[in-house]
Amino acid sequence: MSATNTPTKSVQVDGTPFPYRELGDGNGVPLVLLHHVTAVLDDWDPAVLDGLATERRVIAVDLRGVGRSGGTTPDNFEAMADDVAAFLDALGLDKVDLLGFSLGGIVAQVTTLRYPDRVRRIVLAGTTPANLEGPAGMGAVLQEAIGKAGAEGRHPKHHLFFEQHPAGQADAFLNRLNQRTDEDRDAPISNEAVGAQLTALAKWEQSNTSEDLAAVQQPALVVNGDNDAMWPAASTVRLAELLPNAKLSIYPDSGHGALFQYHEVFVQQVLDFLRG
């Protein structure tokens, strides 16, 4: 089974259906994936999911109000973290590893802070701690990228995720996303859900909770590209400094989508890290 054909399942989370996909049958602690602003299940790179699934049970989920999920997307990360914990309860998972990308990386931080006994290790890709410049301007960044992409007849991820040269590998990444059959693709995210996510990001920039990360004892792997257009790579460095037990990896000549550009390196680093 591959990420391109694994079926979409659904579980009731406090009466609300949450769609998810899982693959891999590795023993040990499952790895739960939390994705970026505007993303649904189809936005996970199959190369990353398939690589991680060689050793791990990998579970990707649409949280409340996203994609095919029911309910209304919360406008704060505390409620999103509560939904992660409720999703774990619904699947009968006592403890997991978390991999959060971008907005999902913030959800992973808050989940770890609110439910420390549920999280063993965390991977934080292309994300930021609270109270640093960047998240509140995400709406403007998205609109600019959409405008540029429309004028060029390209996908916005060309500008949001990748450097504008062949090494950026935007086309290869987008081709991998399109490998999934149309019959079981996720629903696109709604404007209402994106609006709630952007509100949550604006609140995150104003939050004074970044120092709370000193209480996180779980090992963390923090990664990003060296030229992130979504928010500065310096934010990633600061995140690693705030976490007491963090490893930092910055990929060269890459942006927000560095984990997809360097997917083979990223997968190997994550698997090595999760083995401890």
Image (cartoon, rainbow, N blue to C red):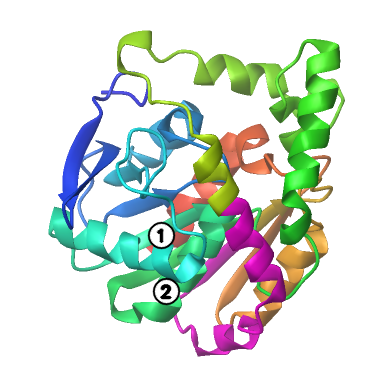
Query: Along the line of sight, which residue is nearer the eye, 88 or 4?
Result: 88
For residue 210, which quarter of the picture? bottom right
Quarter of the image with the C terminus in it:
bottom left
**Image-based side of 1 in relation to 156, left or right:** left
- 125 above or below 255? below
In percent of width and height, residue 155 lies at 70, 20
Name the secondary structure under disc 1: strand
Looking at the picture, which amino acid does disc 1 mark? Leu
Total marks shown come to 2
* Residue on which the image places disc 2: 112
Name the secondary structure under disc 2: helix
The answer to whether the residues at label 1 and label 2 have Cβ atoms under 8 Å apart is yes
Kindly identify the residue that appears in the image at 63 percent across and 88 percent down: 211
Can see residue 111? yes
* Residue on which the image places disc 1: 98
Quarter of the image with the N terminus in it:
top left
Q: Which residues are magenta?
A: 197-222
Kindly identify the residue that appears in the image at 39 percent across and 31 percent down: 50
Kindly identify the residue that appears in the image at 50 percent across and 55 percent down: 100
Q: Is tag 1's residue or tag 2's residue first in the polypeptide sequence? A: 1
Looking at the picture, which amino acid does disc 2 mark? Thr
For residue 59, which quarter of the picture? top left
